[in-house]
Amino acid sequence: MIRIPGAALAAALSLALIAAPTGLSAAAPPSATAAASVGWPQARSDLQADPAIRFGVLPNGMRYAIRRQATPAGQAALRLRFAAGSLMEDDDQAGLAHFLEHMAFNGSKDVKEGEMIKILERLGLAFGADTNASTGFSETIYKLDLPRTDAETVDTSLKLLRETAFNLTIDPAAVDRERGVILAEERARDTPSYRATVKRLDFLLKGQRLPQRLPIGRVEVLKTAPASRIADYYRRWYRPDRAVLVAVGDFDVDSMESKIRSAFGDWAATGPGPADPDHGQVATRTAEATLVVDPGVTQSLQVAWVSPPDKEPDTVAKRRRDLIETLGLAVLNRRYSAIARAADPPFLGAGAYKADQDHAAQLATIGVSAESGRWREALAAAEQEQRRLVQYGVRQEELDREIEEFRASLRAAAARAATRRPSDLAGEVLASLPDDTVVTSPADDLARFEAAVKDLKAETVNAALKGVFQGQGPLLFMTSPTPIEGGEQTLLAALAASQAVAVAPSAATSQIAWPYERFGPPGEVADRSTVKDLGATFVRFRNGVRLTVKPTAFRDDEVLVRVNAGRGMSSLPADRQSPFWAANALTEGGLEKIGVEDMERVLASRFYGSRFNIGDDAFVLSGSTRTGDVAVQLQVLAAYLTEPGWRDTAFARIKAAGRTIHDQYESTVGGVLTRELPGILRSGDRRWTFPTREEMAATTLDDVRAAVTPGLSQGPVEVVIVGDITVDQAIAATAATFGALPPRPAPEPPPPEQRGGPFPAGRADPMVLTHKGRADQAVGYVAWGTSDYWAAPQRARDAAVLREIMKLRLTEELRETQGVTYSPDVNSQHSLVWTGWGYIAANVEAPPDRLPDFFSAVLKIAEDLRRNEVSADELARARQPRLEGLHRAQQTNSYWVSELSGAQADPRRLDVIRQILPGTEKVSPADVKRAAEALLKPEAAFKLMVVPAGSSAAAGATS
């Protein structure tokens, strides 16, 4: 895997449809005593590191950070990070840092090629999900998420990381086998958005090293570099003094420290350490512009000012200065959001941020996403609002609002600190390493925040904002699906014209109150029962509303709420295009008595969510909150259920964004598959097909409203609450909201024959779809229709294990043996809603001329699984990671809020939960063979491929 972090990532995020204020960047993980922190940044800072972490340094210079985290029980996260990435490559090594990352899984002194992944699978780690790695500009990280912390699992994992650190063999034959995988990753990564990001970096960091050292590298190097050149990089940069091991989980810290010292203490570097490469100086620039035209991009602009990187040490004073700037930018982002939500807005979304790009430069940027053809308006509105902020500053009430939101977020983080996941905690330590920042505790972050904002005045923030948008530039970068007449000169002229417009102070906002605190007299409980083995309580109110509650201790101060109303997709006509693509119009439209902007303002100090989607069997409103805000969360969702605002402005923005969505989908092979596959797998049932351009243009807000309103206003209502809450608290909050509504009908059990579009029949020749991307990009897809879950519950569990075995074999054949692809995949589904519908499917991205190899390999694997039983070892390597993944999922609130949904109407769903683990554990080689015999019949295989338009394979394209 390759990551492009820092400002490049932030740039992509800033162009989301709705800009959101950034969070406080200083929230990080745990630390140690002053004596143990030598070699870590806290030894040079007045910030106190989180005392829950033990920091240390081995005599060879390798650093480590260890934290015990007993929740969830028995789990751990190990991370090995090297301060070595693509920036450290020589010209003839471009891409070899990433190549080396791949070779870490391809043989070492004590683990022969092909065995590392199998060893981890036997321990219950799934490749990709639990075993992964990434290469960035300045770092390479190896990741292991352990399902257990017994001695065998921990010792084996540390041994494998040790092998990665200094025992890799980098065999020439293995290197040659891996080339195809690396080239497949380069091929898959080459999308319009990626190409635009690359060109943006090259424009902003003109003449510097970073744009010339993209982690994927250069194709000619990847094709020809000998193994010895990769080994040279390995010996030079994989050194103990450039390595950090992070271990977080349910283990004894003293024991883990001893194991780390034993595993890595004899690692010795060769020769003096190399110096980090010179990034080059930030170039002297004036107003400049670059235009990138690509049919697959959206019309978007960024105006940036480039300065030398901020190399100031991490201190209390620096964090306060950063916070003050961040609060000011949050006000600007709030203003951008309000503009985007107004009638006929000049842009679809905008955002401002300031960030360092991998120590090469500091970027202050405003980014804006424009409706096609309206880029001048978008640029002018974003630029002038930024200038208004700098010239006139923020108002005190705006600042106070952002302080309240930051406070709410930090309080939630502090309250949940004890139950953070090991992977999250390890990630916090890793995030601190590139910038050499101190890992601080959430409690200290909150206290420091309160001290920083005490009596904070707008004048202080306004003074800081004067220096934010400074530096070389302004530099205007634009992406457009169509050419702009006059090109860059036109862009610069438009920017200059906007800069010449005088701006006036922003208008103060009026004070408002939250109008949805009461829904009537609290509802009365009609009956209540307990599902003891699952720790759930069923409640029915007299108005017919059902409530399911499961108190948990998975995460402190987290409560998830889901509201299921009506019957969702099953209530919509199969011959009419469904409005799923415009579902956000409900929440973005606000409420009858208050719009979204005012709603966010009045509830700034509260923690809540509001999402809407159309499920197979319900219209779903959901949100995540903290224990103290459950009442507000339920008020918000009850208001959306009963009085959605359905404002035209929100729907107009969704339609405007959708005008280029087809071009974006068609520009990549994956985009075409994503757009077309749901409808194809339902044989054209219009509830799942993606609308055409003409259908999207013709759809009105009334169409969306008419499809959704009956289920919301008249259908049965089920509320599911899971998390850090008592049953009585959940009942009280629900009684005051949903329980107070007019009567609702009782949920009906699902009909015995609830049909969606049937799964397509098998076909000898693949269905052919086309894309407009690279000529060497294609996708092959093979699927077999199965059945719904209820037809044979154990068979569905058998099929899930069969799926994992197919994935193991397909990965070994196409990735490891043939080197055809980066990530073959196999997935399956057995519907709980639609009678007779389910599938098991394999897919791969590969060059068009290699698709026959894929189809042949899949059918050969399927035939072998039908004829022969799998070995006990292969079964274990497929089944154990699935069991561990299920076990971990069951220790999350999100699992339970999903799995308990619908259980009151259909109690069989409780048995799905009860049987998933024991049913998976009992799957035998004979069960896998029987499932393959029943499901993987060659005549039932549905085949599809997505190939480049104009290619020979596309000549007979069908739709």
Image (cartoon, grey):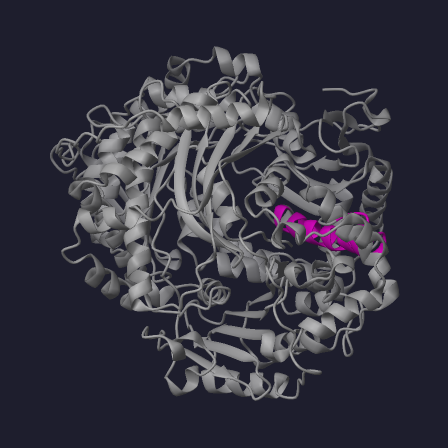
Q: Nearer the viewer, residue 40 or 527?
A: 40
* Residue in the image at 45% along x and 70% along y: 73
* Residue in the image at 16% along x and 35% along y: 514
Residue 427, percent across and down?
A: 48, 63
Residue 804 part of the magenta-drawn span: yes
* Residue in the image at 49% along x and 32% along y: 301
Q: Nearer the viewer, residue 766 or 567?
A: 766
Relative to 193, say whether 457 is above or below.
below
The quarter holding residue 541 reads: top left
Q: Nearer the viewer, residue 608 or 201?
A: 201
The answer to whether residue 569 is seen in the rendering is yes
The C terminus lies in quadrant: top right
The N terminus lies in quadrant: bottom right
In the displayed structure image, the side of residue 536 where residue 727 appears, left or right: left
Which residue lies most toward the right here?
Answer: 173
Q: Nearer the viewer, residue 871 or 314?
A: 314
Relative to 943, say whether 735 is above or below.
below
Q: Which residues are magenta?
A: 796-821
* Residue in the image at 69% along x and 49% along y: 803
